[in-house]
Image (cartoon, grey):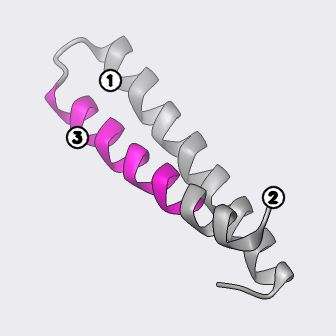
Amino acid sequence: MTSLKQVKRAAAARNLARMARRLANGQTVGSQRADLMRYADVLDEEAVILERRAQEAGTS
């Protein structure tokens, strides 16, 4: 995967994480909220990994 694609995927992962957090904040059922927050955390972690790979490849 090219570094530009990794940057774009990282941005997409961050956007999805933001959306998941917004959804979680609107949930009244605790288990659904917790699941969405965990999903958001996983997406943020994936974004960090993709950004690091992009930087290593020379594009940030």
Q: What is the number of callouts on the image? A: 3
Q: Is residue 24 left or right of residue 55?
A: left
Residue 53's label in the rendered image is none
Q: Residues within 10 Å of mark 3 (few under 14, many from 20)?
A: some
Q: Cα distance, mark 2 to mark 3?
A: 30 Å
Residue tagged by mark 3?
Answer: 22
Q: Earlier in the sequence, mark 1 or mark 2?
A: 2
Q: Residue 17 in magenta?
A: yes
For the residue pair 15 and 3, the one nearer the viewer reads as 3
> Would you place residue 21 above or below residue 34 in this image?
below
Q: Main secondary structure of the magenta part?
A: helix
Foreground mark, 1 or 2, reads 2
Q: Secondary structure at mark 1?
A: helix
Q: Which residue is mark 2?
A: 1
Measured Cα–Cα span from mark 1 to mark 2: 33 Å
Q: Which residue is mark 1?
A: 33
Q: Quadrant for the C terminus, please.
A: bottom right
Count residues near mark 1 (Cα–Cα under 10 Å), then give few for <14, some for 14-19, many for 20+: some
